[in-house]
Image: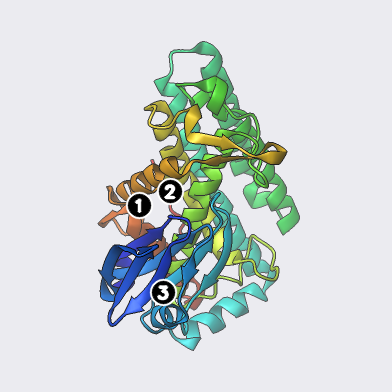
Amino acid sequence: MKSTYLNTLFVTTPGAYVFRDHENLVVKVGDEEKLRVPMHHLGSVVCFGVLTVSTATLGACAENGIGLSFLSENGRFTARIEGEPNGSAQIRRAQFAAAADPARTLALARTFVLGKLHNTRQLLLRAARETDDGADQETLRQAAGTHDTALRYLERSTDLDSLRGREGDAARAYFGGFAGMVKRNREVFGLKERTRRPPRDPMNALLSFLYALLRHDVESALLAIGLDPAIGFLHADRAGRPSLALDMQEELRAPFADRLALALVNREQLKHEDFAAQDGGAFRLTDTARKAVLVAWQQRKQETITHPVTQDEISLALVPHVQARLLARALRGDLPEYPPFTMS
């Protein structure tokens, strides 16, 4: 798991040029060198907005197992370049066989939804305990109650459509009560519904940005283990869609992205002026705010937890890699089922 302990390089400056110089990656803006880092220190590179990456850099990243992702300046994922897949053919054969089996597909999809609903329910209940506002408590507990119902009926979902319906009901309740977890500047950040393309308010813009970062990390973890991110179970296959990465991302949204978004807003580390309105009603983070969020994201991933399955003390940054390994073991039959990541 060499790359799991390495760093992610974020390139955010418009017009930057990224190129290889011997065994280093160099970032220049105009004629000024901004950064030089040895490639063996890097696990992945994420580029935002309009910039240039040399063809030699693309080849060097692929050869050295460094995932290279491209996101828009708003944080929307656009493309990814990866070298030859790691891992044995056995893992992918097992993955493809499970995807071709409707019963196993449903069982795996159910575990991803189970992990997601558990984690969003925990976030709602924690917020309800921490607020003194009676109306907020009621809203949050009602949303958690919708999750309780969905969790009880997951086993009764006999096909993917009914399973996705349960998940969708809980997601609408979650985002419908999300404002109850916002303690500062609720008139700005108290979203009422999830809007993605485009994000229609600052909180949606922040969540979309963090979800894009999470997707990058999950996809990198799956590729490092040898799984195919395009062949999923909960999300339908679609050209250009990393369905398995989106599957696993579901259980990690609340502990990774949602908690960080709420912390940044409730500590007033982000305010209304950190977001720019665009034509068509969309919002995006300003360049300065985006860099601040990236720093907070990296700091958040360095926090340590006790993994609920392995009982090892690890950083949050390693959670996607541990989950990818657990999924691979379940697909090979070494585990009876895939255990999703759940937070207490």
Question: Where is the N terminus found, in terms of image quarters?
Answer: bottom left
Secondary structure beneath dot 2 equals loop
Write down the residue under mark 3: 224
Q: Earlier in the sequence, mark 3 or mark 2?
A: 3
Secondary structure beneath dot 3 equals helix
Q: Residue at x 32, y 67 (%)?
A: 4
Q: Are marks 2 and 1 in contact (CB under 8 Å)?
A: yes
Please tell me whether residue 89 is drawn above or below residue 31 in the rendered image. below
Q: Amino acid at mark 1?
A: Pro
Q: Residue at x 49, y 86 (%)?
A: 90
Question: Which color scheme does this rendered protein use?
Answer: rainbow
Q: Amino acid at mark 2?
A: Thr
Write down the residue under mark 2: 342
The percent position of residue 128, horizontal first and vertical second, equals: 47, 23
Secondary structure beneath dot 1 equals loop
Task: Judge whether residue 140 can be spotted in this image.
Answer: no
Write down the residue under mark 1: 308
Q: Residue at x 75, y 54 (%)?
A: 161
Q: Amino acid at mark 3?
A: Ala
Of the residues tagged 1 and 3, which is closer to the observer? Answer: 3
Task: Judge whether residue 21 can be spotted in this image.
Answer: yes
Please tell me whether residue 121 is drawn above or below residue 238 in the rendered image. above
Alpha carbon distance from label 2 to label 1 = 7 Å
Please tell me whether residue 55 is drawn above or below residue 325 in the rendered image. below
Instruction: Determine the image quadrant of residue 20.
Output: bottom left
The percent position of residue 164, horizontal first and vertical second, equals: 69, 51
Q: Earlier in the sequence, mark 2 or mark 1?
A: 1
